[in-house]
Image: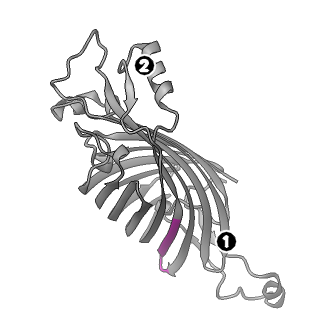
Amino acid sequence: MPPPKIGGTFSSPLPTSQAEATDEQPNENSFEEPLPAGLGVQPGKSHVSIMGWTGSNTFPAIDDANGDQQQQTRRMSAEYVKGLLGDKRIGELAVKLAFDIFTENRVDSDALDAAWHPSRSRTEMGTLTVSYRNVISLGEGFFFKKSATGGVVMTGDLAGEGDQTGWHALTRMGERKIATQYPTTQIAGLAGVEASVWKRQDLGAGISIEAGVGTGADFPVGATGIGNLRGNGQLGLGTPGNLQFDVGVTGSLQWTLGKALSFPKGGGPIDGLVVTPYGQVTWSGHSFSSTVRVDMNALGMRSPLGTLTFSWFF
């Protein structure tokens, strides 16, 4: 039996008392439906995901075409998701820790010194969030997903400045000095909501297509953080080789709070309208998946950002 793809099958078991009472016919609320991979869930299964994100200097040709050297951006995150399975619905409780580094733009007027970049400002952002997600089957291959998120966000010097500068000095592959521009740590709350509708259609021979549209919002509650009002659309193609190909675009009205997220020369997340096209490829096994994704203009920073995510289901 081949391993299931991410998305899997939505199977809601009968309660014991009902199963014993109905030996001949299944309960009308018991059903089994393939899930769109875009939902990112396997029914009743928990998982752990590790993600790494690298930015501008990974794509120097595109940076040069932009006319300057965009900021280097890094993200690392880890997420634990507890899967919950109910009657005609899937629930997930997720805890996520993310760490971002944003670095000021390097413009043409900044001279280079023996392949060393001049000093630039930097900042860090850490977030810890707890989310509840719920997927409901609407029938005929349609699904509705909603989620609510709460947490905390911290910006400033979160102990990464020395490590980054030391690595650059050791390898001579970066700036001589990366100084946190606003080292005082700021802390704020974070709240978010999201909703989306998905449709999946099997074409036979192990091939499927799917589409999803959604909307959401994130609100910093306090002196720092990134907020947005956003909409998203995605198209996907599933193949017999347990590969899933997706393309999509997100449009958001974005704003930042706090001195740590503002750079004199530009860099980091912007305030205003941000349009982010993206593409990704996912391979999924019985209890493991990996995704390679590229976001263009993520957070309004123009340079593409590459993401590699590993997930373990259990």
Q: Distance between the residues labelled 1 and 2?
A: 48 Å
- For the record, the magenta segment spans 139-149
The amino acid sitting under disc 2 is: His
- The residue drawn where x is 28% and y is 20% is 118
Badge 2 element: helix
Does residue 48 appear in the picture of this structure?
A: yes
**Which sits in the foreground, 55 or 102?**
102
| Type of secondary structure dominating the magenta stretch | strand
The residue that disc 2 covers is: 168
The colour style of the image is: one colour
Q: Residue 85 carries which label?
A: 1
Q: Which residue is drawn at 60% across and 76% down?
A: 89
Q: Is residue 41 left or right of residue 313?
A: left
Q: What residue type is labelled 1?
A: Leu
Q: Which of marks 1 and 2 is nearer the N terminus?
A: 1
In this rendering, the answer to whether 49 lies above or below 86 is above
